[in-house]
Image: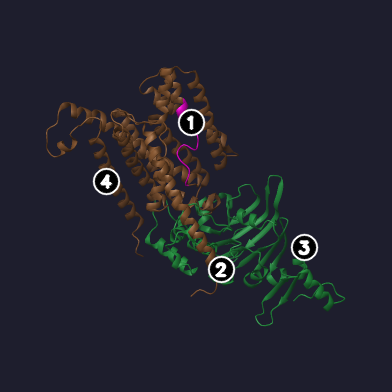
Amino acid sequence: MAPSAEGAPSRPLLETRGLAVAYGERAVLSGVDFTLQPGSVVGLLGPNGAGKSTLVRAISGVLPGYTGSISVLGENLRALPRKELARRIAVVPQEPRFDFPFSALEVAVMGRHPHLHGLAFESAEDVAIARRALERCGALHLAARPIDQLSSGERQRIVFARALAQQAPVLLLDEPASFLDLRFQVELFDRVRELADEGTGVVAVLHDLNLAAEYCDRIVLLRAGRVVAVGTTAEVLTYQNLTSVYETEIYVDLNDITGSLVVTPLSSRARRRLRELLPADDSPPTP
Amino acid sequence: MSSPSLALRLVRVVLGLSLLLVVAIAIAVSFGAAEVGFWQRLLGGAWSETQRAILLALRLPRVLTAAALGGLLGVAGVAFQALLRNPLADPYVLGVSGGASLGGVLALLAGVAGLGVPVAAFAGALASLIAIERIATTGGRLTVFTLLLTGAIFNSFSAALIYFLQSVASREELSAIVFYLMGRVPSAGLTTLVALWAAGVAITLALFASARDFNALTAGEEGAQQLGVDVERLKRRTFVIGSLATALAVATGGLIGFVGLVVPHLLRRLLGPDHRILLPAAFLGGACFLVLADLAARTLAAPTELPVGVVTALLGGPFFLLLLRRRALAAGGELSATGSEANGHGPQR
């Protein structure tokens, strides 16, 4: 694969080829080929232990022991200095941690770290970028609050703001919505969508299949460390794919009014009712 | 944006604490077992030769030594708290202090006098530093958890060896060892004093160079890497530099406790957790604290002198418990506040 000309629209932001990661003897990812284009939101789906978070960690450069290749904006991940990598990839971790009571603004300003050299302090411009990021996440009113006194949902927004302040072309989200109530989930993913429309490439690990259906352009479905299906949401989010990967019956439907995909895991009660309605055929129709 | 810029805050904090240190030094030089007429002299009065000799040859060097030791312990405390991401770490947790004490005790038993004891203690600290670093490194990576365990084991092992040496030592040797380990501020010679201060300033600057990385490290090792920090290099560097600071302090003054714990803790409460402010503040604040603690050690039971380690522990212990208690109360209040917020999480206006 020859890297295309500088700035050409076809050059992927991220590309993995035959990526494999093992923790000791146990293979967590094997043979993962994955591509992220600018302006798209790719959802990583799959059951627990499928390797979603591992894929995010490997791409973010914190797992040195992988095999295969990862390239970031056309350059080999291994060849990129840590700071340069952090200017290209921002990460919102699953469980952000804070050991000391920095203020929300100080945390957001830390997103400027990869842009600062040597002993340099943040400039007024850096602080302004961090404040805009907080504002964008609806968290500017929390700027002066110590991070350890915020609720987990508020913290999640601050960490998202920190990632925005990194101004990286790639954004990795590891279950960013797990601590957020519905309103903030929607707000956060509306922001994610905006960022993608501005050209950022986003990879999001998601548990909520409906959020994935609503916000992702493409889905990578993982099971036991392997890619089971890749494609648009409509291509991947099917009854067959989901039911087989999640090992529970999952019904996929179209909402008549919004046109969105609606994914419903079926309870045993719902399955019984469905059997009464559809006596012969075992597999419900998919859109 | 009402808060002043970081650089301005840094200048203010450094100037303020420097002024405080000068005042503390002036007070400490002016009091002691002998009346030296410091204030008389300041006010233009006369000065006897003896007074002058006590002040310049004995008291001032001792006060300046106390300041350097306090500063070293203060920055070592901040460095190890940042490295272990735990505000309860102190300069002695990672094991070099054990090696230093052992080196010093062996030198005492060998009948070495004068500078030989601190030199031997420093050698012991360096040897343990290298050993601990080797042991805690697996697959080219320094694991903080292993580092902490190795340090604890080194400390208890050294303590056991010291107990053994004490049990076979003569009565005079025993009292020398006990006195050495209790922690006291010597009246260092000019060369030692210059070396201590130069090392103190150099170590503070070297750690200051990593201050922004320390801030990022509070997001965890992976979080810091994702923000562009070379975490492996940072951990190794911090362990070595912090250990050197501890080694110098223990070799010179024995095990003076609580400075490296209380001072960073108090300053973090007053000035916030930003290491760019905290590190220089901890040097100056540690210096103030130990100068005043040493003054208390010299004067409280005059003409007998208390070991300064006893004074810092007596002052620091209750004070630290008070801080912890207030912190626990604050955390408890915050917990219930979060709970009620979670309950009433309706639409916010």
Task: Identify residue type, mark 3.
Answer: Glu
Q: CA distance from mark 4 to mark 3?
A: 69 Å
Q: Chain of mark 3?
A: A
| Dots 3 and 2 on the same chain | no
In the depicted view, which residue is nearer to us: B174 or A65? B174
- In the rendered structure, find residue B19 and report the number of the disc placed on it: 4
Badge 2 is on which residue? Answer: B343
Whether A139 is drawn above or below B51: the answer is: below
Q: Earlier in the sequence, mark 4 or mark 2?
A: 4
Name the secondary structure under disc 4. helix
Name the secondary structure under disc 3. loop
Badge 1 is on which residue? Answer: B98
Q: Residues within 10 Å of mark 2 (few under 14, many from 20)?
A: few
Name the secondary structure under disc 2. helix
In the image, residue B88 lies in the stretch drawn in magenta: yes
Which one of the lettered chains is coloured brown? B
In the depicted view, which residue is nearer to us: A145 or A132? A145
Horizontal placement of B23 versus A35: left or right?
left
Q: Colour of chain A?
A: green
In the image, residue B267 lies in the stretch drawn in magenta: no
Q: CA distance from mark 3 to mark 2?
A: 34 Å
Q: Residues within 10 Å of mark 4 (few under 14, many from 20)?
A: few
In the depicted view, which residue is nearer to us: A41 or B23? B23
Task: Identify residue type, mark 1.
Answer: Gly
Q: Residue at 44% of width from left, 46% of height from top?
A: B321
Q: Position of residue B249 (x, y in %)?
A: 39, 33
Quadrant for residue A33, please give it. bottom right
